[in-house]
Image (spheres, grey):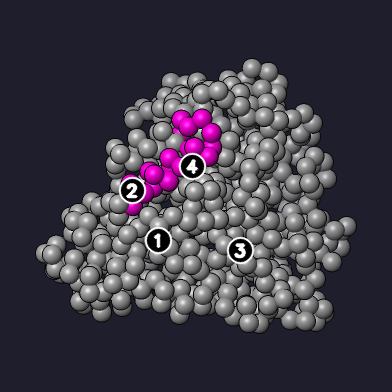
Amino acid sequence: MTPPQPGRVSRRTAVALCAAGALAALSACGGGGAAGSGPSAAGGSYSIGVPSWYIAHLTPGKAGFSGVAQAIWTPLTQVGPDGKLVNAVAQSVQSTDQRHWTITLKQGWKFQNGEPVTAQSFADSWNAAAYAPNTMSNSYLFANFEGYAALNPASGKPATKTLSGVQVTGPDTLKVTLVKPLSMFPYVLAGTAFAPMPESAFKDLAAYDRLPIGNGPYQVAAPGMSPGSQQITLKRFDGYPGAKGNAAQITVKAYQTDATAFTSFRSGAVDIATASGNDLSTASRTYASQLVTSPTAAVVYLGFPLWDERFSDIRVRQAFSLAVDREAIVKSLLQGHARTAAGVAPDVIAGGGGTDCTACGYDPAKARGLLAAAGGWHGSLTLWTKQEPDYQNVLEAIVNQLRTNLGITSITMKAQPTDQIYPNLLGHKTTGPFLLYNGAAYPTVYSQADQLFGETSGTNVTGYKSPAFSALMNRAAAAGTPDEGVQLARQADHAAMADLPLAPLYYPVSGAVHARNLSGVRLGYLGDVDLSSVTVR
């Protein structure tokens, strides 16, 4: 259910950066991080750098799920750092058949302009996100709502602007009807796309996207996201009825890579920086007392283009998977800051940790035999990934392993920006395997399986379709309890992996380094920094 970051497919870890630190601040930190730059309001301030897509759009229907989004909005439910679901704006989310849901809101919630948060606030926001002419990138997340098809006709303009499956039955009550049961619906509601918007937002959605009014612990300060700007400022919303943010102000800066942020941290110009790959190894040696790490509910995988006839034979896909030395990649390239994968979901989420991939070992001889039995390989090969150094380094290692273990000598690799590679894959315009990351939208194996293998998923980029998988997922969605649903989703995941549309490689470990005067730095289940928890001492 995650947008392809389009999600939350880009790495969901937030990179925290501060403004250029003064010499005195650097001295106070003892190097490697400025000490709370910015105005000296109560609670102090710091700056946080993030991947550029985190602040490219600031409307719930367009923004990705991230630490920044969590600071600006509070949806009906939330997933804590421990992966457990709790009610936020919702007092209760109930259903007797997993298809018809009654949502009751808590009283006392307000937007940052003082406007009350009501059931209508959620309904209006959801309708705007699902309405095709608004071109919201998160629109597909509402595909399971009754009435979504009418808002997204195959041709022509929609005849209506509202979801028939969303009814406001009182100031604090919503009735939601889905096209099919979904036992995980309370988890889905924790996504950014399902946050509310105030009445003022609909006067000019484009302006709101640059300067939104949310209901979260932090408010975007004027002028918001100005054209050409690479940063926004967040100010603590003291009227927030939940746990208030610790810092008074946060400067959010956009960066293209984690490596750039880490370099800035080492120069003393940043307060917190996400560290990954070799940078995480350097951080563990140099800033051991200033490093926070956490397993991430995600998988890095080698996907196969099932529309490419060369990969229609499962033996070819098995050969490629068995030719990759996952252990060597984790130990040598990632310096142990990952875990080899034999399934699409790690054990940090419900139903994860299964060994669903029987071809995820390392056996070059068997790989060569399978490829030969399938007719061998003829011609050149191109492998793809995102324009991120860590992935490009890993893919380069895979290219070398395929040359050595499968004897494919003519191999090249190409990298594309996230907003190009996903549309190209979804449009079947790319041939050759691809190295990508996918994080669970919510912490269950159902989420990972649905995102990677569901026919309507925006992150199913292999083109996989399976009636058996769909039937098991439908049973999981209609299960009477979440535990039962998780078990059925595990069966569905196992069925999909038997077809091997992709080869799981490793589960990432997220890390963030921080200045010595900061405390409370913690990572969520997807590796994002929780902005509200950071305290400036």
User: Is 140 rendered above or below residue 26?
Assistant: above
- Outermost residue toward the left in this view: 375
Magenta stretch: dominant secondary structure: helix
Amino acid type of disc 1? Ala
Is 434 one of the magenta-colored residues?
no
**Mark 3 and 1 residues: CB-CB less than 8 Å, in contact?**
no
- Cα–Cα gap, marks 3 and 2: 28 Å
* 366 displayed left or right of 19: left
Amino acid at pointer 2: Ala
Q: Is residue 233 above or below residue 141?
A: below
Q: Residues within 10 Å of mark 4 (few under 14, many from 20)?
A: many
- The magenta-colored residue range is 477-497
Q: Are there few (<14), some (14-19), or many (20+) residues within 10 Å of tag 1?
A: many
- Which mark identifies residue 294? 3
Q: Which mark is residue 342?
A: 1
Q: Closer to the N terminus: mark 3 or mark 2?
A: 3
The CA span between labels 1 and 2 is 13 Å
Residue 519 at what x, y percent from top left?
77, 65
Sequence order check, earlier mark of 1 and 2: 1
Towards the viewer: 239 or 201? 239
Give the quadrant of residue 472.
top left
Residue ID for mark 2 = 496
Report whether 144 appears left or right of 522.
left
Q: Nearer the viewer, residue 121 or 105?
A: 105
Kindly report which numbered mark, 3 or 4, lies closer to the viewer in this rendering. Answer: 4
Q: Which mark is residue 486?
A: 4
Mark closer to the chain start, 3 or 1 = 3
